Every structure is written in C-alpha cells, then in structure tokens.
Image (tube, grey):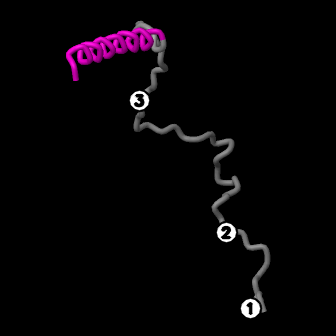
C-alpha cells in the first residue's frame, strides 16, 4: 500500500466515526433528567385481621368438604 492509501483510509475512518456519532445523537437524543413518581409500598407486617364474621362463621358452607351425590354400589363402572 502506498502512503496516500493509508492516509485516505484514516480520513474515511475518521469521517465515518464523526457521521455515526452525529446520527447516534439524533436517534437517541440528549440525556435528560426525567422525574418519575413511584408508588410507595407498605411493608408486610405479621399482624392479621380476622375476616368478617358475617361471611366466615360456623354456619357457613365449607367448600373443602367432600360431596357425595349418591352411594357408589357399582364396583366396575366401565364393564
């Protein structure tokens, strides 16, 4: 390579770096300080409020009980 070719390559690299820096500035913009408001979360505590006795009492339905519709007298249902 001749010395002129090396100088031309350096000029092209420098020019492309400057152009890419300018394009990068237009695309991503300048750095601005934006203020953001966030929701403050209350810390978890060990206290537990009892549920409303209107809905949770001794006469309420218990959804965890096993429901039997009728006695199962058929020992081989798929025969």
In the displayed structure image, the side of residue 4 where residue 47 appears, left or right: right
10 Å crowding of disc 3: few (<14), some (14-19), many (20+): few
Which comes sooner in the sequence, label 3 or label 2? 3
Q: Would you say residue 34 is visible in this rendering?
A: no
The label shown at residue 66 is 2
Q: Is residue 75 above or below residue 28?
A: below
Q: Which residue is mark 3?
A: 43
Where's residue 72, x and y in %?
A: 75, 84
Using the image as rendered, state which of residue 52 and residue 66 is in the foreground.
Answer: 66
Which of the 4 image quadrants contains residue 14?
top left
Q: Is mark 3 in CB contact (under 8 Å) with mark 2?
A: no
Where's residue 25, x and y in %?
A: 42, 10
Q: Residue at x 31, y 16 (%)?
A: 13
The label shown at residue 62 is none
Q: Residue at x 26, y 17 (%)?
A: 5
Q: Which residue is mark 1?
A: 76
Q: Is mark 3 in CB contact (under 8 Å) with mark 1?
A: no
Q: Secondary structure at mark 3?
A: loop
Q: Residue at x 29, y 14 (%)?
A: 8
Which comes sooner in the sequence, label 2 or label 1? 2
- In the orientation shown, which residue stands out farthest toward the front? 2
In the displayed structure image, the side of residue 69 where residue 6 appears, left or right: left
Where's residue 71, x and y in %?
A: 76, 82
Using the image as rendered, state which of residue 58 and residue 62 is in the foreground.
Answer: 62
10 Å crowding of disc 1: few (<14), some (14-19), many (20+): few
Q: Would you say residue 46 is visible in this rendering?
A: yes
Q: In the rendered structure, which segment of residues is drawn in magenta? A: 1-26
Q: Is residue 69 above or below residue 39?
A: below
Where's residue 51, x and y in %?
A: 59, 41
């Amino acid at each position: 390579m001749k010395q002129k070719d090396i100088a031309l390559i350096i000029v092209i690299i420098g020019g492309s770096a400057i152009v890419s820096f300018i394009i990068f500035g237009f695309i991503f913009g300048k750095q601005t300080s934006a203020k953001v408001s966030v929701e403050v979360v209350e810390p978890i505590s060990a206290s537990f409020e009892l549920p409303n006795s209107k809905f949770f009492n001794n006469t309420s339905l218990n959804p965890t009980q096993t429901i039997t519709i009728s006695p199962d007298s058929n020992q081989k249902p798929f025969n």
